[in-house]
Image (tube, helix red, strand yellow):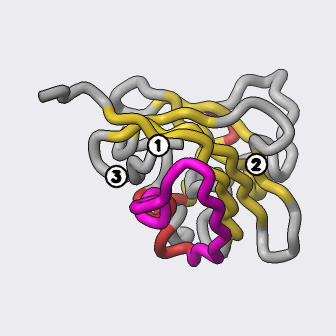
Amino acid sequence: MSELEVGKGTGIVLHFSLKLEDGSVVDSTFEGDAAAFEFGDGNLPEGFESLLVGMKAGDKGEWDVPPEKSFGMPNPNNQQTIARSQFADDIELAEGLVISFADANKSELPGVVKSFTDDEVVIDFNHPLAGETLKFEVQVLSVTALGEEK
């Protein structure tokens, strides 16, 4: 096994799971294919990534990650009230329904229906895990050096 440690300039292959405080699994790779990413590429929030620094192939870890280090706290400004007339007539609104919107850059932005009436729809654009303390479990399978061979 390589003694290379997770950090800048490394590629990591690992299994991970994210659980809510009540133990419900949000996401996990332990039963399927491992996740592979480059350290610092934005695939993991910085608060999760920082926990991996210094780990080596074969290492395991488990942490409780507060909202401030994961997906942040819900921001009331991220809830928008939109006229019902802006939605297609055939859309069947329901609380919890995720709808895709285009932001100013034409990128996809998911929003969750919080409430609705015949006239208005309240959409929450906060990350669905905002405000949650998450249990983050990892098993590092491999760590490889990327690019700069000198």
- Marks 1/2: CA distance? 28 Å
Residue type marked 3 = Gly
Q: Can residue 120 be seen in this view?
A: no
Nearer-N-terminus badge (3/2): 3
Which comes before the other along the chain, label 1 or label 2? Answer: 1
Instruction: Tell me residue 90's x, y (percent).
Output: 83, 22
Mark 1 and mark 3 lie on one chain; the one further toward the N terminus is 1
- How many residues crowd around disc 2 within 10 Å: few (fewer than 14), some, or many (20 or more)? few
Q: Which residue is drawn at 25% across and 26% down?
A: 147
Verify whether residue 54 appears in magenta.
Answer: yes
Residue annotated with mark 1:
2
Residue designated by label 3: 7
**Numbered label attached to residue 27:** 2
Residue 31: quadrant of the picture:
top right
Q: Which residue is depicted at the point 65% across and 61% down? A: 60
Q: Is mark 3 on a helix, strand or loop?
A: loop
